[in-house]
Amino acid sequence: PHAVALALWYHDAIYWPWSKHNEERSADWASRFILGQGLPATLAQTVHQHILDTRHTPGPLTGDAQWVVDIDLSILGQSDAVYRQFERNVRREYFFVRWPLYVAGRSGVLQGFLDRPRIYGTDFFVQRFEAQARSNLSNALKALQDGKIYA
């Protein structure tokens, strides 16, 4: 549980919307902190890997790593109103990306999650959030394809 908690606290510690290295930098920072506190190297290694797992690349995850990733993705399965606000906030983060490029990039992300057999890896998250996440992602994708952003 300590590794999960630390990974969740640190996974977005460094977040620059234009960077593709946020997870790596956050994982490195977490490792430095953990080791600097005299905590076990195995804890630092586990937290480092959990943070790298939040890159959400398709592939098998097991155990605590899957819980970290599912918790990170839990926003996708929230109520329609909460998810719409999330999408508006994502657009604000990427304000510097011109609309056509934003639509292409964001559509690719949303479709990537929809193309997975399961968005969430744990049965708990599948049962609790999968259906709503698929609905939210489909609605957001349609809005982008229609040239709209949630108002």
Image (cartoon, grey):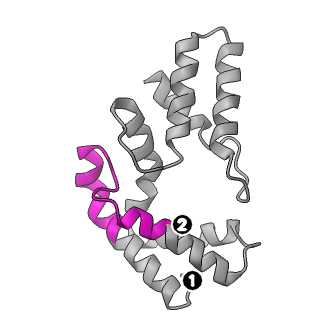
Percent of width and height locating residue 48? 57, 29
Q: Nearer the viewer, residue 86 or 28?
A: 28
Q: Amino acid at mark 2?
A: Phe
Q: Main secondary structure of the magenta part?
A: helix
Quadrant housing the C terminus: bottom right
Q: Which contiguous range is marked in magenta?
A: 109-134
The residue drawn where x is 56% and y is 90% is 147
Instruction: Residue lying at the far right in this picture: please name it.
Output: 96
Q: Nearer the viewer, residue 21 or 15?
A: 21
Vertical placement of 16 versus 94: above or below? above
The residue drawn where x is 51% and y is 70% is 108
Whether residue 123 sits left or right of residue 78 in the image: it is left
To which quarter of the image does residue 69 belong?
Answer: top left
Disc 2 marks which residue? 86
Disc 1 marks which residue? 149
Percent of width and height locating residue 17? 70, 58
Which label sits on residue 77?
A: none
Q: Secondary structure at mark 2?
A: helix
Q: Amino acid at mark 1?
A: Ile
Whether residue 129 sits left or right of residue 23 in the image: it is left
Instruction: Residue lying at the far bottom in this picture: please name it.
Output: 146
Percent of width and height locating residue 103? 59, 79
